[in-house]
Image (cartoon, grey):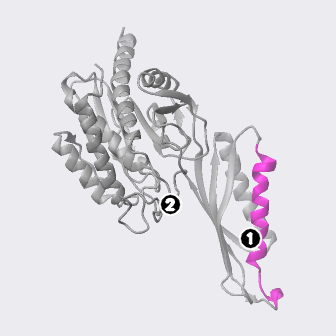
Amino acid sequence: MSFVFSKLENELINELIKYRHYFHENPELAFQENNTTQKIKDILQSWKIKILPTKLKTGVFAEIGPQTAKNTLALRADIDALPIQEESGVPFSSKNPGVMHACGHDTHIASLLGAAFLLKQQEADLPGKVRLLFQPAEEDQEGALHVIEDGKIDGVRAIIGFHNTPGHPIDAIGLHTGIVSGAIDKFKVTLKGVGTHASAPQNGKDVIVALGAELNLLQTIISRRIDPFKPAVLSVTHVNAGNTWNVLPQTAFFEGTVRTADKEARKQIKTNFLKLVKLTAEASDTQADIDWYDGDPSVDNDSWLTEIVKNESRKFASIYEQVPKLGSDDFACFQEHIPGVYANIGNGYNVSAHNPKFKADDRLIATGVKFFTHNTIRILNELNKRKRVNEG
């Protein structure tokens, strides 16, 4: 079974572009994707695709394929937007002030919708079942964990997905075996002291001095305690203390993120962070309350599946070696349970994602549809072969 982009499919792409523009005009934040959810449902139901029940308030989960099939493959697209005021200038710019599809999830939705339509046309002949995951809250709150808890990867043998990637041609697909993203951890430290008039610092316990010491010393964790061959970043991104010029404040806080690509380095940074913050606060005669959140692990592409996806994707796209980066994606949460491949699809040469001027290119939708459809058939066939070999 193969998919050829005939006149019918080209007409479908034009329809998908219209859908993408609709989603772009109507972006919604994590776990607020109510209109997006209903629109996706309406489209799938118009194509007579089976919608699966869910306890989640947002997100859409559906299934295509023979019910007697032995293997199930999941296809994932994220659907949430970012709290960014759009400045792209496209004629279909966001109608929701302060909210924008600045990461291109609207193109991911359109690509998975296109794949759903084509796979439905050949449902009876599919070599397995296909689980469609239109996942909420990728940008915040680890929506993938909620999808897993809701049972939506139960019985699934493997999963694939992609992210659009500026800086590469539209018809290029980036793939890499093993770790391709960073694990993400978040922290917030609140320092508590005693406020006083700036002219009498001896009467207080200065949280600003403590904060300055913390910020400087935290950078030594990476530079002096972590193997330089293990990529890691510790970034303090938000600092706040005081509200006037002549008063030493009672509290201060800073927050930020840690990104790592090595499990041991991740543990080591957290251990050193907690120890250093507590001891530095104590030395400054202040108190430190630490809020640490263990976030997504690293995206880690399965070697067997990645080779299959590389070989199949070469039939319709150019393949390049994806360079691992410390950005994160909660697709990694699925990979802790089932083998998966997360690819990059070129988005042309424009500004990076999470930028108010970000522009996704409509042309990448066709590549995204091909990525999902071609690899669905190939992976399901390979899973069937592997099952027969194991049974033999």
Label 1, on which residue? 211
The reply to whether the magenta stretch includes residue 217 is yes
- The reply to whether callout 1 and callout 2 are in contact (CB within 8 Å) is no
| The quarter of the displayed image where residue 122 is located | top left
State which quarter of the image contains the C terminus: top left
The span shown in magenta is 200-226
Query: What label sits on residue 7 in the rendered view?
Result: none
Q: In the image, residue 33 lies at what x, y percent?
A: 33, 58
Q: Main SS type for the magenta part?
A: helix
Q: Quadrant of the N terminus?
A: top left
Which is in the foreground here, disc 1 or disc 2?
2
Quick one: SS at disc 2? loop
Can you say whether 35 is above or below 381 in the image? below
Q: Is residue 294 visible?
A: yes
Q: CA distance from mark 1 to mark 2?
A: 31 Å
Residue found 73% across the figure and 87% down from its top: 245
**Along the viewing direction, whichever of 331 and 291 lies nearer the viewer:** 331
Q: Residue 111 or 316: which is nearer the viewer?
A: 316
Q: Position of residue 206 (x, y in %)?
A: 77, 79
Label 1 crowd bin: few (<14), some (14–19), many (20+), radius 10 Å: many
Q: Is residue 151 visible?
A: no
- The residue type indicated by label 2 comes to Pro
Circle 1: residue type:
Leu
| Circle on res. 356 | 2
